[in-house]
Image (spheres, helix red, strand yellow):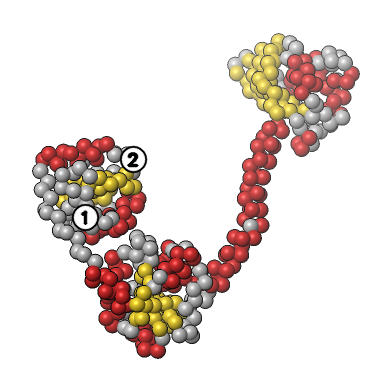
Amino acid sequence: MGKISPVSIKYMIHANFSAEGALEKPDVIGAIFGQTEGLLGHELEMRELQKEGKIGRIEVDLQKSGKMTIGKIHIPTALDQTETTLIAAAVETIERIGPTDAHIEVEQIEDVRGNKRDYIVERAKKLMQNLSGATNSREISSQIRDSVRTSEVKEHGEGKLASGDLSGNEIIVVEGRADVMNLLRNGVNNVIGMNGTKLPDEINELGKTKELTLFVDGDRGGKLIVQNVSDNANIKYVAVAPDGKEVEELMGKEILMALRKKVSVGDFLSKSSREPEKKQEEVFELDEAKKEKLKDIAKQIEGTGKAIIALNNSLSEFKSASVKTLSGTLNRIRERPIAVVMDGTATIPIISAAEDATVQVIVAKNFATTDTKIKLVGF
């Protein structure tokens, strides 16, 4: 018998059969060739088609069930749709297999090329992703540039402070290694990190011979660092990141803009001292009516991922925010918030930010800690 190459198969005929009595596979195959002979003319003679490789090896799966034999027939073809359906219909005309009556019914004709097309599409997607990654010249250039610049990180002094090129007269002092890495990535090389908020001796020594610019985060902690460092080292200028942003997350333009806006330490501290103190709000009395109002708000935002910040004692002015950005919102908010109502769990960073913002009540489903002076209300 001729064989058909798997790569040339177009369709697969799947048929079910049942027969009275015990049969073997050769009986079924013999019936297919014998009882379809001459039905469709010489061009569609199954024996000839198999010799020509247009019909593949016929597979038969059978099992005996009592006095019956049942099973499946699989016929692969390289014919077109019309010819394949004619072959399938011819197989259904078989009424006897061996010495017994039989019934054959085609279950389906499978387009084998459909599976190949699905594979081709999925494989092409993966190859395209790899190809895009390999040919994106901007991304490759960026990766090489970042690798070169971050490889330039050096260690300075006994404290092994992360730094760039300190050979020039002007040095930028930042808080930590991540800040140093970000500045190096963006082409600012004359930088050194303090490894935290505590002033290392190396910074003090650099201040004796270099012109130092202290570059801090745009939050309350940044202002405290300026006060601490300027009291203990010769800092000439101060640069501050935009409100609510950290130096390590700034883009190149933001870094350059912040450095251009640097001011002398004296001017910075003088401006800070002139800023009016926020008026201390009266203590918020959390009575039952206010508690119920806050709980009602909590139920309204349940499942939304939102937070509501109450801005006054009467709970009549509100500001909304996402729970994901709540800590940053509390750090940047100018008003003195009274209460925070939020969906989900009040995490430690959120509670800490709320303490800094002098929030008096937090309403949430759960609390990561209860070690706080803030009143915590669950719902």
User: Visible in this render: residue 221?
Assistant: yes
Secondary structure beneath dot 1 equals loop
> Seen in the image, is 78 located left or right of residue 296?
right
Q: Between residue 356 and residue 146, name the one nearer to us.
A: 356
Q: Compared with residue 223, is residue 202 higher up or lower down, i.e. above or below?
A: below
Q: Dot 2: what SS?
A: loop
Inspect the image, locate mark 2, and give the three-letter code of the amino acid beneath it: Thr
Q: Which residue is mark 2?
A: 304
Looking at the picture, tell me which residue is in the foreground, 58 or 11: 11
Residue at the spot x=49%, y=81% of the render? Answer: 165
Callout 1 amino acid: Arg
Q: Foreground mark, 2 or 1?
A: 1
Residue 269: % across, % down: 28, 74
Q: Residue at x 40, y 89 (%)?
A: 209
Image-based side of 112 in relation to 211, left or right: right
The answer to whether residue 158 of the structure is visible from this angle is no
In the image as oriented, which residue stretches furthest toward the bottom? Answer: 209
Q: Position of residue 297 (x, y in %)?
A: 23, 39
Q: Residue at x 20, y 57 (%)?
A: 358
Instruction: Name the image quarter holding the C terminus.
Output: top left
Tally the marks. 2
238 sits left or right of 135 in the view: left
Give the residue pinned by disc 1: 336
Quadrant where the N terminus lies?
top right
How far apart, in angstroms, are the residues tagged by discs 2 and 1? 25 Å
Position in image of residue 134 (x %, y %): 65, 57
